[in-house]
Amino acid sequence: MANALLQGVEISASQFLDIFNHYDNDGNGYIEGKELQNFIKELQQARKQAGLELTDQMKAFVAEYEKNTEGKIGIVELVQILPTEENFLLFFRQQLKSCAEFMQRDSLGLRLMLCTVSLQRIQRKLMTAASLFPETSDLFVDSERSSSQLKIFDSNNDGKLCLLEMARLLPDQENFLLKFQGVKMPRKEFNKIFELYDKDGNGYMDENELDALLKDLCEKNKKVLDSNKIPTYKTAIMALSDGGKLYRTELALVLCADN
């Protein structure tokens, strides 16, 4: 089945998900190692059987990963060469150009949890923002299409997109949410950290207290976090706050491994 899908010029979101799951044998959310080598081999064979040349994007992809036995790709990389017919991911990334902006767009329903309905609203608003369709257009808004797209990013299959799952849409170089995965801590340790940096003990952190925490985290995790980007980290995290008050629950979304 995957071979037949790889022969297509354009695939649906549900077909894209089938392809990704087919090659992600261990279900860890990545196509890597032998999985990636098999994908490249079968992609080349499928295109040849269909009498189609590799696209420029495919050629660049093959050149980068064909001999790289330690290569690893996720949904973001795969969609560059196998765009879905809706092309929702690429459009989303064009509109939300930085992780801080992503975190701040509460009006799109991205702050905590998303369901299929809110995904439809995002599609409509992004289309409107790009002046591609008027607010009343229903061309990109139907439950079947939204459900297919939702499944692509819903890694735990709970029918919702959490903050981290939505973060998979963003470019790696801008994606501080994924970088913070490397510094997440157990709930018990997180609670101690929160109480330590909540200097006045009022139950929330302000910008100064968060700034002190981020500086220490960057110093301790130099290989993962960049101290020069502390202002960006702080702006993005404070976007989760309630009027400048960053409560334990909101900070846990970023720093607690049990969340």
Image: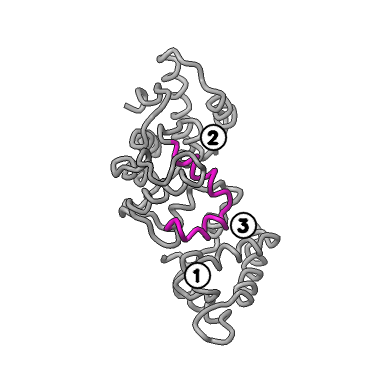
Between the C-alphas of marks 3 and 2, the distance is 23 Å
Q: Are marks 1 and 2 in contact (CB under 8 Å)?
A: no
Who comes first in sequence, dot 3 or dot 2? Answer: 2
The mark closer to the camera, 3 or 2, is 3
Is 99 contained in the magenta span?
yes
Q: Which mark is residue 224?
A: 3
- Judging depth in this view, the residue of 24 and 148 nearest the camera is 148
* Depicted 75 relative to depicted 223: above or below: above
- Judging depth in this view, the residue of 163 and 244 nearest the camera is 244
Between the C-alphas of marks 1 and 3, the distance is 18 Å
Is 48 contained in the magenta span?
no
Q: Quadrant of residue 152?
A: top left
Instruction: Give the side of residue 34 with respect to residue 213, left or right.
Output: left
User: In which quadrant is the C terminus drawn?
Assistant: bottom left
The region drawn magenta spans 87-109
- Judging depth in this view, the residue of 233 and 98 nearest the camera is 98
